[in-house]
Amino acid sequence: MIAYLKGEVAAIYEEQIVLEVSGIGYNILMPSSALELIQGIGNEVKVYTHLNVREDAMQLYGFLTKDDLDFFRLLLGVNGVGPKAALSILSTISPDDLRFAVLSGDAKTIGKAQGIGAKTAQRIIIDLKDKVDLEDAFEKKLSHTGAGKEENSAQDRLVSDAVEALTALGYSAADSLRAVKKARGEGGEEEDIEALLKRSLKYISVK
């Protein structure tokens, strides 16, 4: 119904802002990670919104990027995950990290969000694993790496290349990503693709 709102921040609270647009103040619930990025009252921001309609209320949920909004809606499609839980997850974990957590079956990372138990975290992984693409996850991660972070970008590309090589060998995307993450944990920041693949194969063969 409302794709986005662009206006002046009139107030900032613990879980929401009031955004003034053409003389109307909109209460918008937002992840704490997004609230931290808002520069302060009086600044103009563009907020991508989701309207949640209940019997007793209509609530606007807002995000600073379209990617955050899209993942919020993906989470709402998971059985047992409502707007409050989805907001809690995105307050704790970025969409980039969520994609990799889903792909690698990392329920522990998802479970760090307040109010998200082990069963809900596993359900999120099961429901979203076919909706999250490995190549797309790496592309989004790299695109979100800002200027001055060339080293991080290079490391992300190294991991991406290693995962792609393992999937080309017939291993699943989830197993490949999980193995590469474990291999990166024991290696140094500076290494070549061959060394990373050798260690990754050791982990991917262990069940």
Image (tube, rainbow, N blue to C red):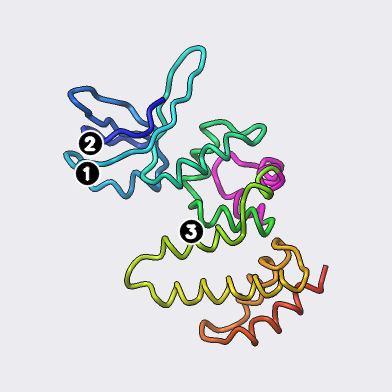
Q: CA distance from mark 3 to mark 1?
A: 28 Å
Pick the residue in front: 191 or 140. 140
Amino acid type at circle 3 is Lys
Give yes or no for residue 110 being in the magenta stretch.
yes
Q: Is residue 185 left or right of residue 204?
A: left
Badge 1 vs badge 2, beta-carbon distance below 8 Å: yes
Give yes or no for residue 36 being in the magenta stretch.
no
Image location of residue 99, percent across then percent down: 58, 54
Q: Which residue is mark 2?
A: 9
Image location of residue 18, percent across then percent down: 27, 30
Q: Which residue is mark 1?
A: 40
Pick the residue in front: 185 or 58. 58
Is residue 171 depicted above or below 96 in this figure? below
Is residue 83 depicted above or below 174 in this figure? above
Q: CA distance from mark 1 to mark 2?
A: 7 Å
User: Which quadrant is home to the N terminus?
Assistant: top left
The residue lying furthest to the front in this view is 168
Q: Along the polypeptide, which appears first: circle 3 or circle 2?
A: 2
- Residue stretch rendered in magenta on the structure: 106-126
Badge 3 vs badge 2, beta-carbon distance below 8 Å: no
Mark 3 or mark 2: which is in front? 3
Badge 3 vs badge 1, beta-carbon distance below 8 Å: no
How many residues crowd around disc 2 within 10 Å: few (fewer than 14), some, or many (20 or more)?
many
Mark 1 or mark 2: which is in front? 2
